[in-house]
Amino acid sequence: MSHDLHESLRDNVRILGDSLGRTIADDLGPGFVDRIETIRGFAKGGRQGEDGSQRELIEYLRQLPDRDLLPVTRAFNQFLNLANIAEQHYRARFRRVEDYRPGTQPVLSELLERARGAGHSPRKLVESLAGMRVELVLTAHPTEVIRRTLIQKYDAIDDCLTAIESSGDYPERGVRAQGRLEELISQAWHTDEIRHERPTPVDEAKWGFAVIENSLWQAVPDFHRDLDNLLLETAGERLPLDAAPIRYASWMGGDRDGNPNVTAKVTREVLLLGRWMAADLYLRDLEQLKAELSMWKANSALRAEVGEVAEPYRELLKRLVTRVEATRDWAKAQLDGRSVDEAPIIETRDQLYAPLLACYRSLCDVGLDTIANGALLDTLRRVAVFGVTLTKLDLRQEASRHAQVMEELTDGLGLGHYRDWDEAKRQEFLLAELSSRRPLIPRRWECSAESREVIDTFRVIASEHREALGTYIISMAGEPSDVLAVALLMKEVGGAVSLPIAPLFETLDDLDHAGEVIDHLLALPGYRELAGDSQEVMIGYSDSAKDAGQLAAAWAQYRAQETLVEVCDRHGVDLTLFHGRGGTVGRGGGPAHAAILSQPPGSVNGSLRVTEQGEMIRFKFGQPEIALRSMEIYACAVLEASLLPPPSPRAEWREEMDRLAKVAHGAYVSVVREDPDFVPYFRSVTPEGALGRLPLGSRPTKRRQDGGVETLRAIPWIFAWTQTRLMLPAWLGSGEAFSERLETPGGLELLREMRQEWPFFGTYLDMLEMLLAKADVDIAAYYEHRLVDEPALKALGERLRTRFGRLQDAVLQVLDQQELLEGTPLIRQAIDVRNPYIDPLHGLQAELLQRNRDADGAISADLSRALMVTMAGIAAGLRNTG
């Protein structure tokens, strides 16, 4: 990366930091800013190895009076958020959404040339892009710690940076932009960064729709326009009008797994919100088109539609505007619980698309192609991608909830106890009922509130158009009966609407048996008639890593996909894999391009679904330019994985991964599951207990409120370890696996060969390297020093840090590097810039946790808020935290 690019990022960090300093000085006085600078100086000195700086930092922080703790934490938190803005701005400006090693930046034009060089015809390239089905599924997992009101201010700050940079010949514009920047930073400083209440699932859905309105609405037609231009240059034709290589779905308001706040009523409300917002956005497009399409030349088809009027396009658009307005008013009335005068409304994508297509064809027929391919084409592209609901809403529920409905039904009807039946008997019962013409559920069936909620969800499905809904996902699926039970409920209650059903395999054991389950399922004639020739399967990254450790889970996920590809090929079924990835390495996170290309050959094949979670939605799709680049990356990766798939791993590589995974799994389990000191250590050294009070998302932090680590959700489990910088879930066990292998003859050479030639293993090592660079065992040791008293727990902490050190040595040896991140300087720089601001927050957090424990959880409101701000600040500094 050139020196100039680094300078651009540094200059903006300085501009924002100086402005924040002036804002704080105006509020709290210059002396307080001097105090902040003293703290930062100690932290920076400690990072540079100056003797005594770290000890001076800790002593200084411990002597701060209570009244200063909150403003100090807020100052460092705000700077880290501003540093993120500067980095996001830099990435948007230079189109660096993700981080790559030199020479590996994905560029679609270069990929198309490579594909042609490999023998793929121009027609094949167009067909591949037109037939591509990539769905990015927006989810509201509780990793986004920043309030929406602050996000809006931060977006406006980004606009100011753009104005300042482009004001060279007009200095007065730069002065105006600088003034607006100062105002916005002052607004942010005087805004409470911590929510006082958890967002509801409807709030989360509104946030997701806002991302579409503020960013994707512009980015989607821009992406297609760039794609059109590229294909015209490469293949001599445009993408078909109705093609949508990348679409959007959502879990916000549909994901009820372990979240009692997501009800059938909520799901219905979110679906209506999507209809209302889509209508509102399309009306803006249609009003623009009505103003612009004033032409009188039209083909006979359009004339037949509107009659002999002077402005045929405006006439047709006027009629369409009336229907879209009626749709918006209907949706709003439904949301408000009001009745509305009946009028024809837009129910389906085609009802909106067809009139626009008539205008497009007419313009082309009369030689006005330039006009047809302007704003009208942009709107057609939006309709193809967003439909009339903006996103498809997925629904997710745990397998045990469906089994409970079946248990109550069979018991109530005197058929026995479903939960006591073995798998064969369950399948026999479910298949018989699927083929039966009589209803199974009695008209006035008395059931539990839990079962009633499940039934009501299927009633919502029955009341919706198919295109408003995505996939029905079954979490904790382990047997064919889990899928058959949902199919039966959909038949009994879902009416004519039948959704794809995707079992989610998320524990190590479930992943190991995924192929066997799908093989058995597809062999059942009764199921195959329902499913047809397509099957979706979701691969869980979060819980599998929590269950087995990251290395063993990653290999199990890879093997499961291989088996599923083979099974579906044998049955003649098109497989779509749905990757439940998170933002962090411990939950399958990392650059999308590398992740997709590291999948088993044949597992992508033009279709892919993947979750985009929490804060990563804002980082990858929050601004039009970055969203545009993110879509290009996905299209590039899926096209490459489909047309130029990676080679299958060699037999010796597979054997090596089996060995590594076995050792890593054993080491992970021996600590997390078998060491009696582990759970007490986890609860003592991390802010896990306080985390439950941070109002991050609508979902509880635990699946159950009793029990230990196994009941904790994967996101807070990783969030808690990230706060202390030990990052344990993403690496524990890997050190033993690599160290043992490096001690055997030929081990180093084999690992280096795998790293160079096998994308799966190379990507795994890259992610592990990034994770190790973000971790800091000295900070983890300080948390332990401040918060842990028992010698046995301290001994465990020492052993964990020793394991970390051995792993870091092993990784550097395999990578043949002297230090971490030698090949990705942007990540290295981002970490180095942030550390002097994150370090004080760690010290303050440990201090506040101890004061909270000393007070038995009864610290003052200001100190409690300061503790929450440290969590938000550390999350902001480390970016992908959950």
Image (cartoon, helix red, strand yellow):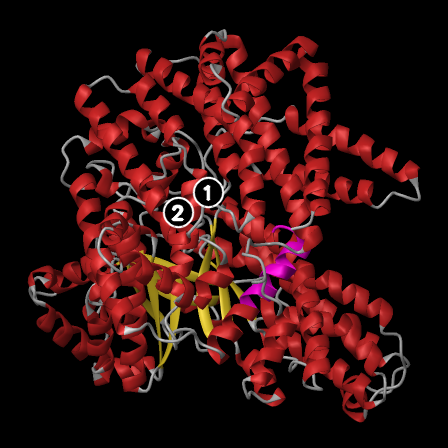
Measured as percent of width and height from the top left, residue 154 is found at 66, 38
Specify whether residue 628 is painted magenta.
Answer: yes
Per the picture, the main secondary structure of the magenta-coloured stretch is helix
Classify residue 84 as left or right of residue 134.
right
Residue 327: image quadrant is bottom right
What segment is highlighted magenta in the picture?
A: 622-635
Q: Residue at x 70, y 65 (%)?
A: 222
Image vertical order of residue 88 relative to residue 785, above or below? below
Number of labelled discs?
A: 2
Mark 1 near mark 2, Cβ–Cβ under 8 Å?
Answer: yes
Q: Nearer the viewer, residue 334 or 109?
A: 109
Q: Of the residues under marks 1 and 2, which one precedes in the sequence?
A: 2
Residue 577: image quadrant is bottom left
Q: Nearer the viewer, residue 42 or 342?
A: 42
- Helix, strand or loop at label 2? It is helix
Measured as percent of width and height from the top left, residue 233 is found at 73, 81
Quick one: quadrant of the C terminus? top left
Q: Dot 2, how many residues are within 10 Å of its Cα: few (below 14), some (14-19), or many (20+)? A: some
Classify residue 394 as left or right of residue 239.
left
Under mark 1, the amino acid is Glu
Q: Nearer the viewer, residue 372 or 577?
A: 577
Under mark 2, the amino acid is Leu
In the rendered image, which residue does mark 2 sit on? 812
Q: Residue at x 54, y 50 (%)?
A: 824
Q: Dot 1, how many residues are within 10 Å of its Cα: few (below 14), some (14-19), or many (20+)? A: some
In the rendered image, which residue does mark 1 sit on? 819
- Helix, strand or loop at label 1? It is loop
